[in-house]
Amino acid sequence: MRKLSGFNVPSKANEAAFDQAVADVAASARVLMQTLVTNATPRNREVEAAKARAASLVRFGGDAGPRL
């Protein structure tokens, strides 16, 4: 809500509207996340990290010692 309203903490006059807007946005996000569908298989963090390390070795080469 800070991005939409332009302030971090609402004034006392706007506090109720701000709190209601936060609750509404949170509820909308919850509905969205619960209804999204994917056909992709779940990813394994360790496998993805290993792929990233391998790609880095290909791109940047092996360890050439400490960099200054």
Image: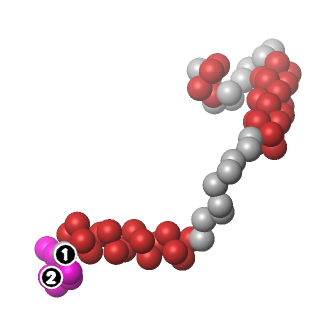
Residue 61, labelled with which disc?
Answer: 1
User: In this picture, is 27 found above or below 64?
Assistant: above
Are the residues tagged 2 and 1 within 8 Å (C-beta)?
Answer: yes
Residue 38 seen from this side: yes
Look at the image and give the residue range highlighted in magenta: 62-68
Q: Which residue occupies the foreground of this view, 9 or 29?
A: 29
**Residue drawn at 62 percent across, 21 percent down:** 4
Residue 18 horizontal/vertical position (percent)? 78, 23
Q: Residue at x 82, y 27 (%)?
A: 24
Horizontal side, residue 42 vs residue 21: left or right? left
Label 2 to label 1, Cα distance in Å?
A: 8 Å
- Quick one: 12 or 51, which is closer to the camera? 51
SS at circle 2:
loop
Q: Which mark is residue 64?
A: 2
Relative to 41, say whether 22 is above or below.
above
Q: Is residue 15 visible?
A: no
